[in-house]
Image (cartoon, rainbow, N blue to C red):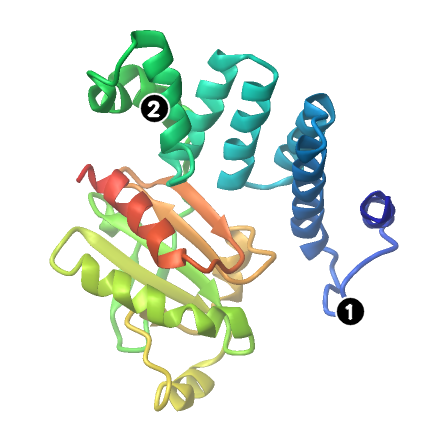
Amino acid sequence: MLLDKAINLMLQGRLRLYSDIGGKIVSFYLTDAYMTGARMALEKGDAAEALSRVKAAEALANETPVAAYALEGKIWQQLNNPRRAESAYLQAWQKGSKDALEPLQEIYAARHANLDGFQQYLKSEGVVSAWLTDKKPALEFHVKALDGTELDLAALRGKVVVLNFWSLGCAPCRAEIPQLNRLVTDFKGKDVVFIAFALDDTKDLQESLRELNFSYHLVPDSLAVAQKFDVSAYPKHIVIDKEGRIYAVLEGAGENRHDDLQMIIERVLGT
């Protein structure tokens, strides 16, 4: 199929976006291509092929996409393996997937004959601790925002830190700013800090802010920080928990980015 030809060309380094000089964006699109192939295989009823492709997507991604865990759960359900389906859905749910909640309820109800105790199950030490072991410490940074605010990740320990990597030339980045501003309003007065690392310099950002309203702490000239967090595609969102560990990573733009991040932040806050 054409999808497989595209994947092979990307793997061989023969298919690359014009702007992708270093080839870093290829892994992002490879992950997406394998995910697309997995969905197509699942629709055809070939669960084994779908599982193979989703595992390839997970292996290629720097951070496994939330959608990959949710899709893996569907595949394991089709393969009649509820335990593995449950594990995949739990990882998707912990990362903020709304699609994982209903199948988790179905699996729980099938085991217990009802949903009594379901919320306690989600909050149980076993479920949470299994996820915590996969968290990685976020790399430290010390930067100054446009408004002069000093931002040091170590000093922010005890707060949830939400990072957004973006640039003025990225249309999807600009399009999602109103959703991100809503997040700042939603969590006003709570232990959440929002930081936007821009590739652009101070002058360009200041000029753009005359028309562009962005409520995050804006940090200019952030290529070094972006490289530290292995950012290869924009926009990218990273949520860091109160212990300074990376809790979730969302790559690319999303139509419901506000809802995705809101659910993750609430989960980290424990609300």
Residue 4 picture location, percent across and down: 83, 43
266 vs 189: above or below: above
* 147 left or right of 42 in image: left
Quadrant occupied by the N terminus: top right
Total tally of numbered discs in the picture = 2
Whether residue 56 is visible? no
Mark 1, other Cα within 10 Å: few <14 / some 14–19 / many ≥20? few
Mark 2, other Cα within 10 Å: few <14 / some 14–19 / many ≥20? some
Q: Which residue is mark 1?
A: 18
**Of the pair 255 and 10, the residue shown nearer to us:** 255
Q: Residue placed at 41% from the left, 91% from the top? A: 207
* 68 left or right of 113 in image: right
Q: Earlier in the sequence, mark 1 or mark 2?
A: 1
Quadrant of the rendered image containing residue 54:
top right
Quadrant occupied by the C terminus: top left
* 241 left or right of 6 in image: left
CA separation in Å, label 1 and label 2: 45 Å
The residue under label 1 is which amino acid type?
Tyr
Whether residue 205 is visible? yes
**Of the pair 79 and 261, the residue shown nearer to us:** 79
Residue 137 picture location, percent across and down: 40, 37
Q: Residue placed at 33% from the left, 62% from the top? A: 195
Quadrant of the rendered image containing residue 21:
bottom right
Q: Which residue is mark 2?
A: 105
147 vs 40: above or below: below
Q: Residue furthest top?
A: 112
Q: Dot 2 lies on which element?
A: helix
Residue 249 picture location, percent across and down: 46, 46
